[in-house]
Amino acid sequence: MANPPIAFLGTGAYVPSRILGNNEIAQRVETSDEWIVTRTGIRERRIAGPTETVSDMATAAARAALEDAQISADQIDLIILATLTPELTMPATACLVQKKLGVSERAACFDLNAACTGFLYALDTAWALLASGRYRHALVIGAEKLSSVLDWTDRSTCVLFGDAAGAAILGPARTNTQGILGTRLHTVPGAAELLYIPGPEVSPNPLDLRRLLRMKGREVFKFAVRAMEDVARELLEQHQIEAHQIDRVIPHQANLRIIDAIAHYLKLPLDRFYINLDRYGNTSAASIPLALHEARQQGKIRPGDLTLLVAFGAGLTYGGALVRW
Ligand code: ACO
């Protein structure tokens, strides 16, 4: 008998309690609520407390996902954590989460960095490893403390991002509808300077000494629209699905204008897209699992629904996934 498909068995999310609204940012840098809302759709974001770590947030989201999946920590044999803000340079934040959750030594634990496309890269990797039969239940997390890498004097970036974590449990499908149908991942070569955080290497740019996020927003914007449309079309064609057959799109939550443009190009109504960036801003690798979990909680993804997950990020990376619930 063929193995059952690999499916999402549960989802979870966590956001810090501290809310940072646009007006509060406008007291620190020259901006306004009106500018931020019209250019991005973002109204507020969450900021982790000074002692609240990436592994704390990731563990909270993972606990919620385990409960949702009705799976115990000792059934997990693979943890993949996507982040661009790891708690330590080593070991991987996934190892810290393993300890906090009480996942056994049998588990393989590692981090992965594909910036805002991180959750989809982690999903694709976990899917492949589970489908190989070598692992049975994977915990896939996207978690970020972006507030720690933002230049709070740079109005063109500090208004965009927030802190959060989202998680999913993947394993053998439990119903005959659910399963991951397909994924596509890509990377544009030679585009690193559009969006980066410097490392310890010496750079000719004195600003890089501060090791904070730098971005050419306008170029990233154009890339984002083209990339997410292309990968969505590629997946749809590959699986012979028409765009209108998608019940819900979970896009990376970077900018409402980007999502609006994709809806327009795919000829889908905007209400087919789940949007929460107004409340959280761009939470990078946490963005898609956080949106997925909220959409499920609000009944906006129901058993049997077909969803398209689509993201872009530094790299420049981009990707998509088709998932039946
Ligand atoms: N408040 C007021 N004015 C601002 C602000 C601000 N917060 N930020 C920039 N401006 C000014 C600029 O200085 C510029 O002024 P100028 O014309 O006098 O030079 C003007 O607004 C227009 O700037 P643009 O950059 O052209 O504004 P744009 O409409 O492109 O919006 C934005 C900027 C929101 C950053 C947009 O380009 C964007 O969303 N880009 C995509 C970014 C993104 O999604 N990045 C995440 C990638 S995911 C990852 O991997 C982390």
Image: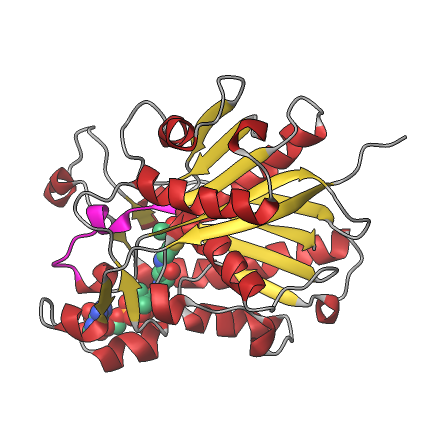
Q: Nearer the viewer, residue 263 or 41?
A: 41
Instruction: Give the side of residue 125 with respect to residue 30, left or right.
Output: right
Q: Is residue 217 magenta?
A: no
Report the magenta residues as a range.
Answer: 143-154
The quadrant of the rendered image in which ligand 1 is seen is bottom left
- What's the coloring here? secondary structure
Residue 105, can we see it?
yes
Residue 46 rendering spot, x and y as whole percentages: 28, 60
Q: Say if 75 sits above or below 124 in the image.
A: above
Q: Say if 267 sits above or below 174 in the image.
A: below
Residue appearing at x 52%, y 61% in the figure: 251
Residue appearing at x 48%, y 27% in the figure: 103
Position of the C terminus by quadrant: bottom right
Q: Is residue 148 magenta?
A: yes
Residue 81 rendering spot, x and y as whole percentages: 44, 36
Residue appearing at x 48%, y 69% in the figure: 275
Residue 55 rendering spot, x and y as whole percentages: 33, 37
Instruction: Give the side of residue 172 with respect to residue 53, left or right.
Output: right
Q: What is the count of numbered marks?
A: 0
Q: Residue furthest right?
A: 1
Q: Nearer the viewer, residue 282 or 211?
A: 282
Q: Say if 87 sits above or below 16 in the image.
A: above
- In which quadrant of the rendered view does residue 256 lie? bottom left
Residue 109 rendering spot, x and y as whole percentages: 47, 25
Residue 191, can we see it?
no
